Structure formats: structure tokens, C-alpha cells
Amino acid sequence: WRAALLSKVPAYALNWACYQQLRRYRLTMTGEESTTPLEDLVIGALASSISVCLMIPLDTIKVRMTTLNAGGIAYLGISDCVKRMLKEEGVYAFYRGLPPRLVSVVPMSCLQFAVYEDLKRQLPKLHWPNSSQNRHGVPLSKQDDDDQRKNKNLQP
């Protein structure tokens, strides 16, 4: 699970960083305050495509080292794996799994970013109960209780 965690965390971080940079660039270029849901989808698709294209060589190396080492074709380490892949198969070997990866990641990721941005737009519009009270309206601290009494006395 550690290898998966070590590959997923940088991939997700890169994905979010790409998304934020692309979104910021879009807002700067248009002068708008917010993006539209369609723009969120497109920016999310671009960000995840960039992230996948940058991370797939590392993922390919990880998969090769775990599966082929178990199958009897042992690599001596990461550098041996990279050298042998380049020598025996060329650069294309690092990107052989790119099309299926894009098909599986991009739709999920662009929807994730679109939902995220929509929730950011919608949540402030919701009515939230006073967070300084419990569910029965009782103040959670003495200061809150004093503040409520003052407010009641000030109301007409």
C-alpha cells in the first residue's frame, strides 16, 4: 500500500495544482470573478490530462518493477528499469498505457472539479444554524449566553 500511496499522493497534488493554475489563468485572462460549470469541466479535463501525462512514466516503472520482478524478469532497481526500457523498447514504452489511463481518469476528474466548484458556489447560499448553539438553540459558552442576552435587550 505504501507504493500506491507514494504514487497517488503526488499525482493528486499535481492534478489539483494544475487545476488551480489553469483556473487562475482563465480568470485572469477573462477578468471574471468565477468560472462557469462548463469551464470547470474543461479546466478539470485539461488539468487531469496534464497530470496523467506527467505521472504515467513513474506509474509504468512502478508497475514494471512489481509485476515483472514477480514474473522472473528482475530489474536491479529504478535506474536499471528505466535504462532497459529505453534501450529495449524506446520512450513509447513509458506511455503505452496512456490512452486507457486518460479514458479512465479524465471524466472522473473533470466531474470532481465541476462538483467541487459548484459546491463552493452553492454552500454559502444555504442557511446554516448559528454554530455557537447546539441543536436545541442553547449557547455553547457563557460568552455566547451573555451576547445573546445583550442582543435580546437591544431588539425592539
Image (tube, rainbow, N blue to C red):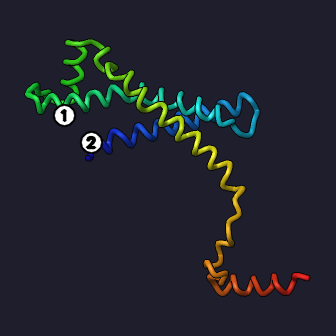
Q: Nearer the viewer, residue 38 or 66?
A: 38
Given residues 88 and 97, the one toward you in this image is 97
| Amino acid type, mark 1 | Thr
Q: Residues within 10 Å of mark 2 (few under 14, many from 20)?
A: few
Circle 1 residues within 10 Å: few <14, some 14–19, many ≥20:
some
Query: Foreground residue, 5 or 78?
Result: 5
In the displayed orientation, state which residue is furthest to the right.
156
Q: How many marks?
A: 2
Residue 32 location, x and y as percent? 75, 35
Residue for point 31% across, 19% down: 96
Q: Is residue 149 above or below residue 130?
A: below
Task: Tell me what residue is drawn at x 40 percent, y 39 percent.
Answer: 10
Q: Quadrant of residue 21?
A: top right
Q: What residue is rendered at 65% in x and 78% in y? A: 133
66 sits to left or right of 137: left
> Which quarter of the picture shows residue 13?
top left
In contact (CB < 8 Å): disc 2 and disc 1: yes
Checking the image for residue 66, the label placed there is: 1
In x, y percent, where is residue 59?
31, 31
> Element at badge 1?
helix
Task: Give, as a three-letter code, the residue at label 2.
Answer: Ala
Position in image of residue 149 (x %, y %): 77, 87
The residue under the point 82% across, 84% down is: 152
Local SS, label 2? helix
Q: CA distance from mark 2 to mark 1?
A: 10 Å
**Residue 123 in which image quadrant:** bottom right
| Residue 22, horizontal then vertical, whole percent | 59, 31
Query: Where does the C terminus fall, quadrant-wise?
Result: bottom right
Question: Closer to the N terminus: mark 2 or mark 1?
Answer: 2
Q: Which residue is mark 2?
A: 3
